[in-house]
Amino acid sequence: RLQPRPKVGSSLGVLHHYRIHGIRPKRETQPAELGFYDFAVFGGKAVRLVRLHLDFQDVETLHLEVVGSLLELQDWALDVRWLPADRQSLLCVAVAHNAVLLLDSTTGNALVQCSCLEGCLLYSALLLVHESWRDTVLVGGTVFQQLVIWKPGGDDMAGCGHKAPVERRLLGHSGVIFSISYLQEKGYLASASDDRSIRVWDVGALGGPGGKCGDLNPICLRVLYGHQARVFSVRLSAGYAYSAGEDGACLVWDVVGGGKVIRTLKGHRAGGVRSLAVGRGTGGDETWVATGGADGGVRLWKVEEEKEGLEGRVTDLKFPGPGLPKVVSIAGEEQNMCWSQCLVCTDRGAVCQYRDGRWTTLWEGPSEFYSYCVMETVTTFVTNIGSTVTLCAVANISGSIQVFSTSDPLAGMRLTGRPGKIHSIFWKKGKDQLYLLASGAEGFVCRWYVEVKTKENSVLVLNVVPLPPFLLPLCSKRWLTAAICFQHSSNKVLWVCGDRRGSLLLFEENIEFNRSDDEEVNEGLQMGRKNRIMEDSTLQPLSCLFGVHGKHGVTSVFEYRGLFYSTGKDGCVRVFRVSGIQPGENESDLNLEVLRVQRACRGMEWLERLREARFVIAGFHAVHFVIWDPVRQERLMVVPCGGGHRSWSLWPSHTGVWAGCGALVFIKQGAVLTSQHPGEMLGSAGKDGGTGGWSLREGIHGRGIWCVSRLGRIEEIRNDSQTSKINTKMYWEIVVTGGEDTSLAVLAINPVSGVNKVLSVITDHISGVRTVTAVTQPRGNALSALLLSAGGRAQIQCNRLLVVWDRQRLTPSCQVVQVASHRLDLQWEKKRNRHKTVKMDPESRQVWMRLFSLNEAKGQIDMLWETFYHQRCVLCVASCTVMHGCLCFSRRFKLLFSTATDGRIAVWHLTESLLISADNSSGATAPPVPCLVIPAHQSGVNSLAVWVEKMGQEDGCLVTVASGGDDGQLTVSTVRVQYPENGKLQLHLLSQHSFPFAHAASLTALKLLSPGLLVSTSSDQRVCLWRVSGTDISHSGALCSHVADAAALAEKEIEPEGGGRLSDRGNGAK
């Protein structure tokens, strides 16, 4: 039985500089006793044979081996098939100029070559082979938006050079054809096109004995439109079609039953799904789908092809009444993998329970509970009986609250709040306490401490203690919508609440209870005396963030690892903290402080709650309830419920880690519906409407990676059983990448296994991220970094990252705090009616260089000075520090190096510029002037590496500047820095050496491994090592990288060996 094993894998370089276009197995069912499988791998103008060794006794072991040499062709290979009847390894190869080769895979010789009379280019091809070359049929998708069917191995084509006629021609597409699939059992042919459509044709029998070319008049059965962009791939299965496109979706189509989309598989980032494979399971009623995306990720999906099991199914629980359901809540222990009961409150004041497939009425309220009521349930642990009970609270329009247990509803009690309508009611668990909150009229929130006990006769008893009420600030819609409590100290509890106006509130209360379990009567009298004191006082908020979530209100608040998270109907998640509770902070100054604002996916404006451990967001997207994973940028669960204006309850599959599935019970048009039938196991991946499949390989960026920065490493902390087995320490490298998709990805990479995990995705940029840098510092077993990123629209973002080892999940985790941001033209964005005004000087036309200062405490990025000296696009900057004098009495000077498209390097005395800016802080500062200009290249300078030699000498020091440019040249310039008595540095060019044609294309990145040892990369996909001295540049070695358009490097030193590791990025990363 097929099971995903994401940690089991093998990697092998096969086609050198060619991209792999396809993989074809030699036999569909190769004998298992052989212990290996042969594949033909093709792409570009090359084909190669690869053997996969698989130990069926130990499935954890995989090994790839290259068989033979690289077979290079004269044309681009579009499809490759093995000839099954031939004993020798013969391959049929379809090439781009509408021709087919018969290739001897051992020698690489073309035995037969046949072309079509239709001498045009093909965008796609499908070879149908049977027993021999004469039975072969080719289906090609031409640049003329047609499908042509012809036979390369006819009876009269014994020799090479023969041209075969077109047997069938299929017309209809209005764009080029990217993919073709054929289903032999039905005689169906499917084609995917640039026109965003999939066409299914009834062509009859193709291939087989004699090389059939199908019916004389094939017809188009279906034209399927559902993708939002180009369709790259299509596959046919019995009655179904699978298509993958540039919109990042894989659609499942019911071809026979009307041509509708019956399921959408989404899990890849921007850039689309580029490859698709479909296979049948052993049971016959399930299909496995594998997708490969432009983000570099590979995902595996299980699709059960049953009409009643497709996405979007809901089950009606057949609520019988009395009355119409108004509020629904799932009850039970969240540790269970399936939900078993739910409670419904009706407009007739009745509370009904669904359990074991039937409805029962637990409690019927008097007439004052008719028409309007709110309900909330909680499951709590009762210590003296060692089991859990479910409590239910029902409130009405007159201020009354009925509290009872579902196991004994008649033993409940009636509580009275303030007169007037109760808008919301909450159960909240403290460290060892259970609280009940009721938000009523005039902003008063009545509160009770609730204790559950049992008497000797096993009768439940509820002990209730009134607490001082909260008083909300004056505003419209003055009631609570979310609350959480946590114990700040041994005698203080903090409450963080959210209201309907969108505000976040902070309350503090003292714990004054001293209970005696020996004498309940004395305990009750003691509580009663305190109650009279508490009822006369109200608690005012210590801190208020008014309206931070907009006028539609806060929907949830929860705490995780010392940080608080709130969601609202403004579509945002706000991360905040309570200042004053950390060690060393002033406890008298308690305030709420927002650290980060994060949006969910586009169009998801109504957020309801978060789940801890795995950071996921629950909310409503149009008429669907959606669970969204912001790290993987995918929907984990989708339920068509009709929208957010309804009562609903969510049951997760596990409290610790969200597996991507759960049960949603909701009310729609007077019916109680559920997405998962009670008692049914909440499976992990593969359930319809559930998670986005197994991730066999994590995707990073959907488009090009433009920048990379290594932060450091953290140690893997194992549990006791793992520590006894493995004695060596394991580390995870922490790397940040930024790209064209406007996001920053925080990655954890295991250098031993090669496994990479996406810890966090930062989506604060509005355009592509061009550069990133960080200042890091270790904090014990954690890693703290101040991350600065900049990109399009002249935007700078600053975030504080804290990377730790999660002992619960046994994986690295990352917290992101938004520190500051800066926009060049923020005032333009705030300008009214800007769409009626022409922007004469957009930020993309600026050719300036600016210096900023960052104040992390105030969260500000301020500009110190700017200069337009270069008058051209500034491409790169670098800095170094020189020191004058001894270590005890030294003066430090900061030098800044900048390059532009004119091929010159400007050197700035940064320390002097900062002093001038400080002296003229009240007014505009004069732009600084470079103290040295170095002509280095004939065109733009893309990269710099700077280091200082002979530091601390009285007569000065030497600064070496290595530069690489668009001309492919590596230039090393030596600058002498002298310290005159007047305090102004004097710089002059001492020597300059060049290495022409260091790369065959633009030199895009330089990194200094050690003084005199450089590494460079270029879009020619080479990584070169150089040794540099004052008089010479020598080439020490080179490696080829599969990363196309390499644009940056990040290095890591390895202490024992004295070597280093490099990270290369461009259209991918290595």
Image (spheres, rainbow, N blue to C red):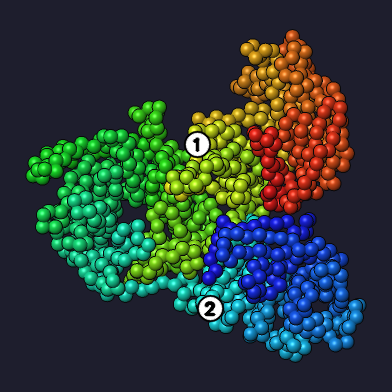
Residue 753 lies, in percent from the top left, at: 60, 50
As measured in the structure, the alpha-carbon distance from the residue carrying label 2 to the one carrying label 1 is 50 Å
Helix, strand or loop at label 1? It is: loop
Helix, strand or loop at label 2? It is: loop
Residue that appears at 64% across and 33% down: 1055
Task: Judge by depth and name the residue closer to the eye, 321 or 168.
Answer: 168
Q: Dot 2, crowdedness within 10 Å: few (<14), some or many (≥20)?
A: few
Q: Which residue is mark 1?
A: 781
Residue 189 lies, in percent from the top left, at: 68, 80
Q: Which residue is mark 2?
A: 284
Q: Amino acid at mark 1?
A: Asn
Residue that appears at 18% across and 45% down: 465
Residue that appears at 50% across and 30% down: 857
Q: Dot 1, crowdedness within 10 Å: few (<14), some or many (≥20)?
A: few
Q: Is residue 404 above or below residue 1002?
A: below
Task: Judge by depth and name the residue closer to the eye, 13 or 857.
Answer: 13
Using the rendered image of the protein, determine whether residue 217 is visible from the camera's viewpoint.
no
Residue that appears at 60% across and 29% down: 853
